[in-house]
């Protein structure tokens, strides 16, 4: 029987991690995978647990949680420094955005995929000292992520819907930024900037419909400054991934991008807030950076 390390975030999905952990271990065992479970105890703890597992000899590490847990796991894998170690992802989070690219619809499907053993190499991104799996957001969507992380009494897409309304009413800003990529420099006021490896953010928003996990490029999607009414009009299009032809939206495929501003910028990576007052954000692609079960 295969022996693996399973790292579970018990707080993922508003407690879904704690509720499902015993069933996940049992299902893996039924499929021939003997999982030694470790529970995270605090934010960023999964990073340390992954590093500890890999440096202790683990050849495959499984993580059960949401996009924030995946964010920690990929950072742990990169810090451990062994690219041959395989990562398995079991989605039990609120948004589960990254796994939509892998067609992992639930934790049972993920367990079966891990047991089957098929893998693929996928790209990651880097933003400052952090790696990310799904994407970086600057501006409005980062403010939404910040507010969503403070909502503890809802689950799933309604969390992001409420956070979006609060951001629109209380935190609507259009900071002036400079965007540099591929020898091009653009100065403009923005509503948001998404630099995406995956397609979806916030549980249901198809921000980068053309993104792929292994194409060696990131999708840069920029929404220029819009009024509150303009943002509300754009939301239905983003839900369907039909916003790229909107007159306020531009998009490019990039390997590296730098965003700078004299105004404070809110920045998230995979829903985890990296800064509330950044003045410069540098993002680059890390091709074929990690091997995952898929």
Image (cartoon, grey):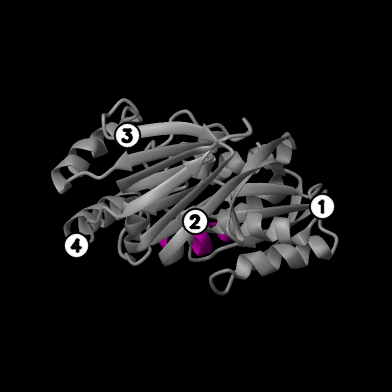
80, above or below 29, in the image: below
Residue at image mark 1: 59
Out of 36 and 194, give the one closest to the viewer: 194
The C terminus: image quadrant: top right
Out of 241 and 188, give the one closest to the viewer: 188
Comparing marks 1 and 2, which lies closer to the viewer? Answer: 2
Which sits earlier in the primary sequence, circle 1 or circle 4? 1
Which sits earlier in the primary sequence, circle 1 or circle 3? 1
Q: Residue at x 82, y 52 (%)?
A: 59
Q: Residues within 10 Å of mark 3 (few under 14, many from 20)?
A: some
Tell me residue 175's x, y (percent).
30, 55
Q: Residue at x 71, y 50 (%)?
A: 29
Q: Using the numbered discs, state the Cα–Cα distance from disc 1 to disc 4 in whole angstroms.
A: 47 Å
Residue at image mark 4: 170
Comparing marks 2 and 4, which lies closer to the viewer? Answer: 2
Q: Using the numbered discs, state the Cα–Cα distance from disc 4 to disc 3 in whole angstroms.
A: 23 Å
Q: Quadrant of residue 182?
A: top right
Tell me residue 278's x, y (percent).
43, 64
Q: Residues within 10 Å of mark 2 (few under 14, many from 20)?
A: some
Magenta stretch bounds: 13-22
Q: Residues within 10 Å of mark 4 (few under 14, many from 20)?
A: few
Q: Quadrant of residue 194?
A: top left
Q: Is residue 48 visible?
A: yes
Residue at image mark 3: 249
């Amino acid at each position: 029987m295969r022996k693996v390390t399973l790292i579970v975030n018990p707080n993922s999905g508003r407690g879904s991690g704690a509720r499902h952990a015993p069933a996940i271990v049992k299902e893996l065992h039924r499929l021939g995978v003997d999982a030694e479970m470790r529970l995270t105890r605090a934010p960023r703890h999964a990073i340390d647990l992954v590093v500890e597992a890999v440096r202790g000899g683990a050849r495959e590490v499984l993580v059960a949680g949401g996009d924030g847990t995946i964010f920690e796991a990929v950072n742990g894998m990169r810090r451990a420094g062994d690219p041959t170690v395989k990562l398995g992802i079991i989605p039990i989070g609120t948004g589960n955005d990254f796994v939509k690219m892998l067609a992992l619809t639930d934790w049972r499907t993920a367990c079966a995929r891990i047991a089957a053993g098929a893998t693929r190499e996928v790209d990651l991104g880097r933003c400052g000292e952090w790696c990310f799996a799904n994407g970086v957001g600057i501006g409005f969507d980062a403010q939404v992520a910040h507010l969503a992380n403070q909502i503890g009494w809802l689950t799933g897409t309604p969390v992001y819907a409420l956070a979006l309304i609060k951001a629109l009413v209380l935190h609507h800003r259009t900071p002036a930024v400079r965007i540099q990529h591929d020898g091009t420099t653009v100065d403009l006021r923005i509503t948001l900037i998404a630099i995406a490896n995956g397609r979806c953010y916030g549980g249901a928003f198809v921000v980068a419909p053309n993104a792929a996990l292994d194409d060696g490029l990131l999708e840069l999607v920029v929404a220029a400054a819009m009024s509150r009414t303009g943002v509300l009009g754009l939301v239905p299009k983003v839900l369907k991934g039909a916003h790229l032809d909107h007159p306020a939206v531009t998009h490019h495929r990039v390997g590296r991008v730098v965003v700078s501003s004299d105004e404070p910028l809110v920045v998230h990576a995979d829903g985890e807030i990296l800064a509330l007052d950044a003045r410069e954000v540098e993002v680059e692609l890390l091709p074929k950076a990690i091997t995952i079960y898929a």
